[in-house]
Image (spheres, rainbow, N blue to C red):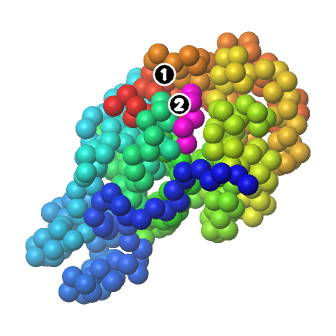
Amino acid sequence: MTAPLPLVFDAPRRGMPPRHLADLDAEGRRAAMAELGLPKFRADQIARQYYGRLQADPAAMTDLPAAVRDTIAGALFPPLLTPVRHIACDSGETRKTLWRAGDGTLLESVLMRYPDRATLCISSQAGCGMACPFCATGQGGLNRNLSTAEIVDQVRAAAADLRDGAVPGGAGRLSNIVFMGMGEPLANYKRVVNAVRRITSAAPDGLGISQRNVVVSTVGLAPAIRKLADEGLSVTLAVSLHTPDDELRDTLVPVNNRWPVAEVLAAARYYADKTGRRISVEYALIRDINDHPWRADMLGAKLHKALGSRVHVNVIPLNPTPGSKWDASPKPVEREFVRRVEAQGVPCTVRDTRGQEIAAACGQLAAEG
Ligand code: SF4
């Protein structure tokens, strides 16, 4: 029997912020109207302001009577996220935002602009309990899960800033979301799935971003991957594998002790079968740790066997954190790694290292505070 790891799935609302509009689905919003003594039609009106006009301040919802604005301000719009600071790099095309939640918790999101799209990397937890040794966030442990509204509001705020031209590069539209900020999304399962629904539903139920443009990442919580496959969503699943062998992965990604590589790949296969989506495999390439030619061969072979052509490997040059013994692999080693994976019939590319200066990769965010 495997000893249970201290993983918390859908822990109670301990430490959670008070209820916010974005925590509620359509039925919940109508119930909230009844509770506040407001007519049902106000539910859609308020949701259109939040999701359609990206307005989170009831005082600015001028199509509502003043008394209604006051009522909902207290009941549905508690202080959620306040920007502490924005940090820009890549000529301003990448912007990291540090947020403070109502209880003082810090979290981050990163907006990356490209010629054809704008991608927001969001956090699903404050801190992370997965304890990957090469990751700054992992060293601090899990602070708490984020609420659905705290996840959704990172997206709403970025969409509003882009629309309003508040980000260098002029006005634009937020098109892609990746759950690759702080935290293990599938360890905050219910709130993350609810957030995905709000982010991807059309107004007045959500922000209208295409499910195909949403990536949910995981270190490999196999049962949660299978559960996600059954949700009827068509988001991309990104599995942070980082090595194809259990011996090293037990150390690099400690949750591997619970769900080893074969189980993770079987769950990924189930996800691909159910959703028809190609699996993204993330591989942080670390000098002399997981960058050996034989590991590249094994990775390609195992992925090809488990997933056929429905997989793509993203090699991520490790973003070294100050004072860490972990470092990125030299470029020739990286090129050879990619060549060997591809030789096994598995497409493999080196991920754009946007945001390196501001430490933007899975788990390398808020540790710098
Ligand atoms: S690498 Fe990702 S999953 Fe691992 S500890 Fe860091 S944030 Fe958590």
Q: Is 312 on the left or on the right of 135, as rendered?
A: right
- Residue 244 vs 35, above or below: the answer is above
Q: Residue at x 46, y 61 (%)?
A: 11
Label 2 lies in ligand 1 vicinity (Cβ under 8 Å): yes
- Which of the image's four quarters has the C terminus? top left
Q: Residue at x 86, y 29 (%)?
A: 297
Q: Which residue is mark 2?
A: 135
Residue 255, located in which quarter of the rendered image?
A: top right
Question: Distance of mark 2 from mark 1, alpha carbons?
Answer: 8 Å
User: x and y percent of residue 304 in the render?
Assistant: 86, 42
Start-end of magenta stretch: 130-134
Q: Is 153 on the left or on the right of 285, as rendered?
A: left
Q: Residue at x 34, y 82 (%)?
A: 30
Label 2: how many Cα within 10 Å (few below 14, some 14–19, many 20+): many
Residue 97, located in which quarter of the rendered image?
A: top left
Look at label 1 and name its amino acid: Thr
Q: Which residue is mark 1?
A: 321
